[in-house]
Image (cartoon, rainbow, N blue to C red):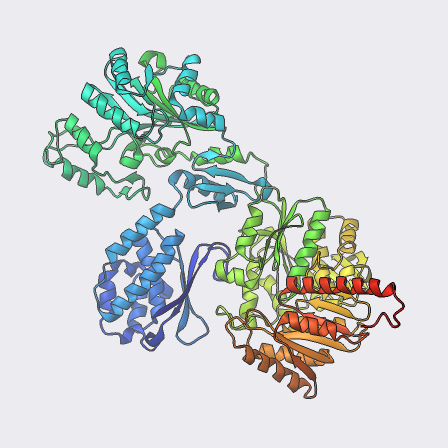
Amino acid sequence: MRIREINVMRGPNYWSVRRHKLVVMVLDLEELEQSPTHQISGFLDRLKKMLPGMYEHRCSEGRPGGFYHRVEEGTWMGHVIEHIALEIQTLAGMDVGFGRTRSYGEEGVYHVVFDYAEEKVGVFAARSAVRIAQALVDGKDYHLEDDIMEMRKLRESSRLGPSTGSIIEEAASRGIPWIRLNKYSLCQLGYGRNQRRIQATVTSQTSSIGVDIAKDKEDTKYLLAQAEIPVPKGEIIRTEAGLKEAVDDLRYPLVIKPIDGNHGRGVTTDIRDWNQAQAAFELAKRISSSVIVEQFITGEDYRILVINHRMVAAAKRLPAQVMADGKHTVRQLIEIANSDPRRGYGHEKVLTSITVDDITHKQLSIQNLGLDSVPPAGQVVVLKDTANLSTGGTSVDVTDVVHPSIVFMAERISRIVGLDICGIDFMTTDISAPVSETRGAVIEVNAGPGFRMHLAPAEGLPRNVAAPVIDMLYPPGSASRIPIIGVTGTNGKTTTTRLMAHMVKMMGYTVGYTTTDGIYIQNHKMMSGDCSGPGSAEFVLKDPTVNFAVFETARGGILRAGLGFQNCNTAIVTNIAPDHLGLKGIHTLDQLAKVKSVLVESVVPEGYAILNADDDLVYAMREKATCRIALFSMDESNPRIRRHMREGGLCAIYENGFITICKGEWKLRVIKAVNVPLTFGGKAAFMIQNVLPVALAGYIHGFELGDISSSLESFIPSPAQTPGRLNLFNFRNFDVLLDYAHNTAGLHALKNLTDKMDGKPKVGIIAGIGDRREEDNVGIGRVAASMFDEIIIRQDKNLRGKNGQELLDLVIRGLQEEDPDKKYRIITDEKEAILFALENAIPGSLIVICGDAVSDSLELLKRFKEEEATKYYEWSRTDIPNRGVF
């Protein structure tokens, strides 16, 4: 077996619009295509032995054991690998269950699709499942435990921590989109101008001064003491001599900790002699050059969580410990504690497994114990010196019993230090009693406190402490999203996107948009290249200046990773025509339409899908849409349009020369097509077809008809506005039209325009395309033969894996099938082909360049025009006859 490629879906995709997190593996079974499972001796028995949990996989039979039965009857290895990938992720602690295996369109090659919880784990599971399946086929041993542990490690290294994760989950439950900004915990909530950021439990609203104060223990203690908040007495030291003075002054028991540490790092508590003090001093010095020596306050350790200056939770924290039974050693008691199903590796479960380290040995020594000691029954054996959950500690929720005076004190502290989210470490013998009675004290104030102890305490009520964070970041009535319009289809996407973005900008928005030639923020080009995929959309959505987005959405990005956004407000589908078929497992127009329909199915229920009623495949997309439908058509008598109008629907039509919006059966005429520069005086029917959905989308988004008309009238087709899309250059004696038409449907549409244009002879510069089917390239030749008087055949720079001569032969075959006498010339270099056409242009001719390297072609044409102007100026100063002719 051979893995051809692995793609990771992160948004709505071809396989599922609702399930965004999918691994899509293209797997070639090679010789195993001829060996379904029932023909492999002993395969099922070995599978059951290695993965007995797969009995629960119901598969298509819908019952436990259903998958095993399928294997027994005979199924293909791709299907088995799908189930193995799901099962091993479950064994690693990630419960996943969705999978599909479908033909790639080639014999023995399959799309193996399955859920993942963490992206790196999903990719590892795909490769591991193939290795496991091969071992089962070959009857060889396989160390599954190693792969399970590796997946657990990958998850812990890449997943969001419990605090960040809880905030993200709460945001998602409210329909707030989010984007992970780095491999750690920096995340963006919301889109564009409505974004907020979090990093663990520090937010974009957190005061940097507040964080600095909380990090500096000396400043924190000083401010709190000034505000009559009880804090332990302490001193800042840097040397062992200073330590000796502090010990003499403060007396035992003591606490020694680094001045700017966090999460319990370098902290030693309940120090009772000089040797312990020296060791604690050295430990703290590893973290910070300055060290705090404080009185050790007796009592129990509590964490009070304050969000937006309101106490939301409190927990008693206990260091890792075991209860002796008089029978087992300490080592055995730790093993028993770690067998608790609530304990796991890192943050994978409610509690973290207890590990034995130097601190454990030190704590046992203080209690006159060792790992092999058997303590008397009932003794609590403390294993760590701090109560952190990450070292095996536990928490008990006490939110409902905190004394009102302590609540008041905690909320004051959050304002004194200046933190929107803070964790207050408080030591007292009784949290339900006033501080004045218990002589408790505030030990520390923490910026970015962990939420885990409150989300899942070992005892007591779990608290959804993420909810008040979202309430603070997005108060009722505030928006987290920005309007998004997605544009897809085969032809016309880029022009439609640019026109839509132009209209939005004219309405006063800061618009971000993506096209096949770049990413733009308010017409400033941020990036060049094909930017019609999900990464480019995310680029725009991360920009804090943008408050409206328009995205060209191509098939390649959808198949590679899904959409770059969860939902859009409006989807425009221009048309479906043969293009890129035979790539990425997409072989038919129906499959291509399904890819494009992902955008339609991602529209929010209150939004609109704007569909081409003249295209059967586009019109059919309404059947799976969960949003409202609007239609557009070049024919007002189209029965689909008539029916939609009678039902009170919205549509845009071309009627009596007008771009018209219909609301029910009422017509709202926007502008005459001849007055829209993009339509070339109404001659370019395919451009009118692009204008219709844009006008309709503007109306849907609340733009006034006059503003829509002005936007259409002010959008001029030019190298600046529409690079490579109907760019007309008027030279002195001939004209040049540059267009990106790159398939037969696009060429047919362009032919309809050039047939109406003056210019004789018509010279076409065309090329075969490497990632197209044989019949597509022959079709390009056939259309070109009917379209042009003379033809220059060039080649793209990127042949996309095809042989250059093969592409030339296919185009020539098409030319000769249509017109055996058609004149053509082969000049493979695009630049040389264009220069030849320009330098040999016959007066009155029209040269049509179907370009690949649009920016290069534009620069060449501009330079040629400048040179022509210079020469004309020089000739005009002399008396040379016929100076207008080259």
Q: Nearer the viewer, residue 831 or 535?
A: 831
Instruction: Please identify the quadrant where the C terminus is shown.
Output: bottom right
Residue at 52% x, 60% y: name it.
Answer: 558
Q: In this view, does 457 lie to the left or right of 308?
A: left
Residue at 41% x, 76% y: name it.
Answer: 107
Residue at 22% x, 25% y: name it.
Answer: 279
Residue 447 horizontal/vertical position (percent): 42, 29
Q: Which of 445 and 87 is in front in this view?
A: 445
Residue 219 horizontal/vertical position (percent): 42, 19
Hey, which quadrant is residue 757 in on the image?
bottom right
Q: In this view, does 726 lie to the left or right of 229?
A: right
Instruction: Please identify the quadrant where the N terminus is shown.
Output: bottom left
Residue at 24% x, 70% y: name it.
Answer: 138
Residue 198, compared with residue 788, is above or below; it is: above
Outermost front residue = 878
Residue 203, compared with residue 136, is above or below; it is: above
Hey, which quadrant is residue 56 in on the image?
bottom left
Hey, which quadrant is residue 35 in on the image?
bottom left
Residue 180 horizontal/vertical position (percent): 47, 46
Q: In this view, does 272 lie to the left or right of 768?
A: left
Residue 550 in view, yes or no: no
